[in-house]
Amino acid sequence: MRAIFSHRAIWPVLALALILIVDGIIAPSFFAIRIVEGRAFGNLIDILYRAVPTGIVALGMAVVIGTKGIDLSVGAIISICGAVIAWRIHAGDPHVVILLLALATGLLCGLWNGFLVAILDIQPIIATLILMVSGRGIGLMINLLYGGTDPSFESALLQGLSVGHIWLVPTRLVLAAGIFLGLWLLMRKTALGMFTEAVGGNAAAADLAGINSRLIKYSAYLISGFCAAAAGVILTADTHTSDPVSVGMYIELDAILAVVIGGGSLSGGRIYLGMTLLGTLVIQTLTTSILTSGLPPEYNLVVKAFVVLVVLLLQSNNARGLLFAVVGERKK
Amino acid sequence: MWAAVLRGLTLVSRIQLKAISKSFPGVRALDEVDFDAAAGEIHALLGENGAGKSTLIKIMTGALQSNSGEIYLDGKPVTITSPADARRQGVNAVYQEVNLVPTMSVVANLTLGKQPRRFGFVDWSAAKEFARNRLKRLSLDINVDRMLGSYPIAIQQLVAIARALDDDTRVLVLDEPTASLDTAETKMLFSILRELKAQGLAIIFITHFLDQVFEISDCITVLRNGKAVGTVRTSKTDLHGVITLMIGRDLGQTKKRKYNTHSNKDVPMLIAKGLGRRRTIAPFDLELRKAEVLGLSGLLGSGRTETAKLVFGAIKHDSGTLMYNGQQMSGNSPRQSLRLGIAFCPEERKAEGIFAELSVRENIIIGLQMKRGWLNLLSQSEQERLSNEMVKALSIATPDIEKPIGQLSGGNQQKVVLARSLVSKPSVMILDEPTRGIDVGAHAEIINLIRKLCEDGMALLVASSEIPELVEFSDRVMVLRDRKIVGELVGSQITREKIVQTIAGGN
């Protein structure tokens, strides 16, 4: 029992369970899954489906936060990738090349962030703020390259990746699983994860232990840029248009929140990839639940903020101790 | 008038501490310490790192509460509950790091938190008047509208003192006030201190510059391992006497032991020629041979740590060369040193040694993993085998190797840091204060380990503030003073007396 309660997954799992139980009470049909035209439909599928872009971005964010950094520019990177996709489709490039180009664009953005943070030693929050602010403008400028009159497009390949499905499973879930697996192997089956956590936990000690902390920080921003680009492909293909102003708006905040709900600390030193996905699910389940519960949409954001606050308080040892002390006092 | 009266009564005790004790979990920081500073006296408080100086000051200034003991101000028993309370009672302190706001004006800094107000707004002309008055007391005439940060450190230091001096200040504590001052600036500060002393203040002066102690102080109290080991009038002692107090007695019997002294035919593993860095350490020559322990001795601030870090490459040198095994090395990168087989255990365990959130296992194998590169991860079973081996060999007390190292005791953390170096089988190990802040048992174990590693053929460079311990394990000792190597003792020459003499030099 004690082992279960001290496991770090317990509070996010409890939160998730609680939200789902409330959903079940409000509308028993919440869990229904129907199969229509060879695809699965239902709230649970919908939650997973919508959680994918945030989840992928959050995975990259978890690595950056592990180095004691932060990447605010992920939304802007999504915007730039979307613009690149629409631009190159108008130019008539093969779509496979465009896919690779979009991912390369994300890496390029990561290269820029990494340069500012790891080489110039600019504080991560400021360094990535630069691209966060300028990125959507860059997206709009790329749209201008082909006149910018009609940024929508059709692409069987990209839309297949985003909204298609393999048998019953949405393709984007398979993509997310692939990225998670790849990143997990990179972090846990090479020493990169350990080095990243060492640099985030104690940069001075890491340097004295011979770890190249600049390179490690650099790699984290590259990973985050790549993940943002992957999310950018999915989001852009979903609407099959380049909309630099609003695509992926505030996704960086949900991603950071997912990492934190998953137990990651902004003071760095630990990377929990699986827990980050769990955190993303908590956020998305909450959002979907509020939308389907019939609560007026005006309440959406406030309720979400409240539940997030409760989850974070439950995770904090201090707050929990305080709560138990108060409850204990009452019992006496 | 008060000043005149007080000058006549210079031996009236201003602040008196009786049998002050303070414990932290696992450490007795102060053990029945008596301390007495008279009115119109500059009283130097001396001791090595960890001797209890800062704990004692914190108790005087209310930042910490003692577990037992009494404090008297001008003969009346008092309790001091907080720094603000201390100020109210006339005990003010200026800490080593100037804790003012460099981006604000001098006026704003001097009046911060007590701005004169008119109609709810800050009355800046009154504030300026107040600031000028404060500075006048220190004979300082500067433009109070300028940003504090635009003045030299010495002036900032004086502004900090001005801020600390209220009209009713009775005791002024200065923690390393000259650490970042040059000679002329120090002179200026001292003349001001003499004036304040004439006004009847008791000034408690903490420093590691012993020459300054003899220049300015009237009385000296030495702390060692949480005990006040002596209070002497400055005029009645000399440098040698003070150093002897600071580092203490021999551990008793000096065991006869074998020294690994080498003939000149041995090729040294590590040769430093003219290695140095401006403002950090004067160029020095150093040779380290197989199977020997070379000790680095000197007082706090003499450059022990800097020497060790320069040889390892953690501080970049700007003169001289470094050879390892007959090969020239850049000596400017910890990574290169580690790859060649030179390991380093830093003094500041928390800040530079451990990865607190990572497990004991990860903390142990990370050094070896670095050498293998990030792609070539040690298998989980190999990691566990190596870690368990080390935990056993160094008797590290931990329930299991997956426990975060931050939760272990200081001594065990230190052993893990040593294990990290050992696991990659280095041929040279550089240790900086390997026994700092650990309990007696672990202390003995680490000293035995150093001897054993040496007998197995390793070359060790060990910087330590504890002379008895250097006597116990060194084959050679190099002595530092004022960031210079001033002497070398070999084999049976290594005694506490000899080391103390060398540290004190010709003075």
Image (cartoon, coloured by chain):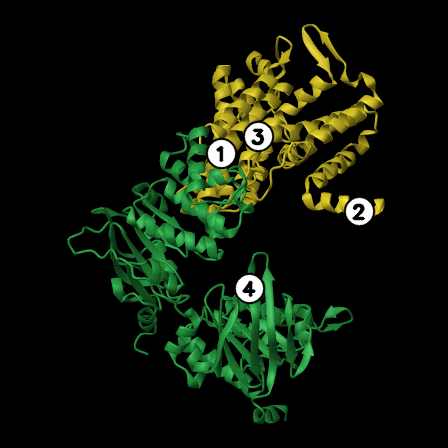
Chain colours: A yellow, B green
Residue that appears at 30% across and 59% down? B276
Q: Secondary structure at mark 4?
A: strand
Q: CA distance from mark 3 to mark 4?
A: 43 Å
Given the image, on which type of amino acid does mark 2 rest?
A: Val
Query: Contact (CB < 8 A) between labels 1 and 4?
Result: no
Residue B84 visible to the viewer: yes
Given the image, on which type of amino acid does mark 3 rest?
A: Leu
Q: Chain of mark 4?
A: B
Report the residue marked by disc 4: B29
Query: Contact (CB < 8 A) between labels 2 and 1?
Result: no
- Residue sitting nearer the eye, B261 or B84: B261
Report the residue marked by disc 2: A326
Labels 2, 1: front one: 2
Q: Where does the image place residue A217, in percent across and percent down from the top left?
A: 47, 39
- Residue sitting nearer the eye, B67 or B239: B67
Given the image, on which type of amino acid does mark 1 rest?
A: Gly
Query: Contact (CB < 8 A) between labels 3 and 2?
Result: no
Labels 2, 4: front one: 4
Q: CA distance from mark 3 to mark 2?
A: 34 Å
Residue that appears at 31% across and 67% down? B495
Q: Chain of mark 3?
A: A
Report the residue that reaches farthest toward the left. B265
Q: Is residue A155 left or right of residue B315?
A: right
Placement of B445 over or under A240, stated as above or below? below
Q: Secondary structure at mark 3?
A: helix
Q: CA distance from mark 2 to mark 1?
A: 40 Å
